[in-house]
Image (spheres, rainbow, N blue to C red):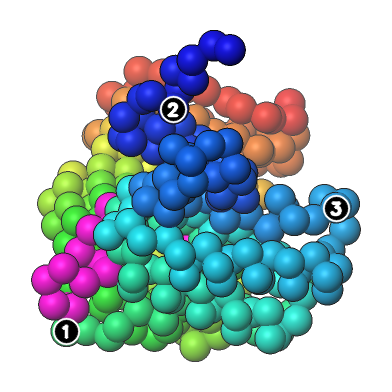
Amino acid sequence: MEADRLSALPDELLHNVLSFLPASQAVRSSVLSRRWRRLWRSAPCLDVDIHDFVGNPNHWVRMEEWEKFARFTDTLFLLHDAPSLDRLRLHFMVAMDPQAHQCSRWITDAVARLRPAALEVDVANLCKTQPRLQPPPPPPPPAGSCGRRLRILRLTCVSLDEGFPGWVRAGCPALEDLALAWCRVALREIACGAELRRLAMEGCDDPLCHASGLAIVGGSRLASLSLTFYPWVYNEGGVRVTEAESVVRASIRVAGREANARFAESIWKLFDVRHLELSGSQMMAILRKESKKFQTFHNIRTLLIGDCDMKINGNIQALGLFLQKTPGLQRLTLQHHML
């Protein structure tokens, strides 16, 4: 019988192997041999995905599948004893409110106890209640608490407590990458921390913010801004970005219904960056209506315009007027256009 060379490797390398596996498979590795029995408990990366427990990925979770997943997840977090995690990924499908509350508990408890450096939560749900992440409110948590290690935070379809913006600013001093997609959060202002380099927002909504608009206060290291807007969210108050001189790349997408003048003006004031991407069904409408008001965008070197119908009357002329305002442009890309 050949020697088990894999088991002879040090724990650090075996943990690296386990980090490429879903949590359900990492736990199964405990049956390989006595050497592997407890390795998964201290693995630095956890990927908990309900799809590993669903028989048909094209259908919603059956109750027996959810119960099996819930038992696994409860046991996983109970037995996992690593002092901290390099990465924690949680992917749920939720169809009933009790399931959403259970997911909320897993999210908050795991963040507090396992203190991940990177956290990704992705929720697909059909119920009225979204799973919640309820971080401690400001002032900042004491040193060594959950947010101090967090460098990457990506949330999809999560309901966020009203203290979330303050927690990000004051309680996550090492945060470098923040992405929010389709989250329910009352965001009137988001102030970037000193280390934040990338900020991405898509489809985040709260009725209380429709009139007040959104203010983004950049940080000294913010280099990349990716924003997808649906004008019914911030149509009344618009979007304001300040203290963002360090931004060199911006991707701005505007979809949905027609934007009003205030929202449109707030959008084009974000354009003067070195690398600019513009897309969405309403972007060319903004260029058509606002192009005569444009300032000169001295910083733009590369410009990508995507998902626009150039057959619509006035779009080509609007693009021409916009290009006249970009004297330093070196490369223009038209992507997914109808000509």
Tag 2: Cα neighbours inside 10 Å, few (<14), some, or many (≥20)?
some
Between tags 1 and 3, which lies in front? 3
Q: CA distance from mark 1 to mark 3?
A: 45 Å
Q: Quadrant of the C terminus?
A: top right
Image quadrant in which you'd find residue 248: top left
Q: Nearer the viewer, residue 127 or 274?
A: 127
> Where is residue 154 shown, x and y percent of the image?
44, 56
Residue 74 inside the magenta-drawn segment: no
Residue 55 - label: 3
Image quadrant in which you'd find residue 148: bottom left
The amino acid type found where label 1 is placed reads Pro
Tag 1: Cα neighbours inside 10 Å, few (<14), some, or many (≥20)?
few
Residue 139 - label: 1
Q: Is residue 259 above or below residue 20?
A: below
**Seen in the image, is 295 located left or right of residue 221?**
right
- Residue name at image x 70 percent, y 85 percent: 97
Tag 3's secondary structure?
loop
Question: Tag 2 or tag 3, which sits nearer the N-term?
Answer: 2
- Residue name at image x 62 percent, y 50 percent: 24
Q: Nearer the viewer, residue 195 or 67?
A: 67
Residue where numbered disc 2 is placed: 7
- For this orientation, the residue located farthest to the top is 2
Mark 1 and mark 3 residues within 8 Å of each other at the beta carbon: no
Q: Nearer the viewer, residue 98 or 41?
A: 41
Q: Which residues are magenta?
A: 140-155
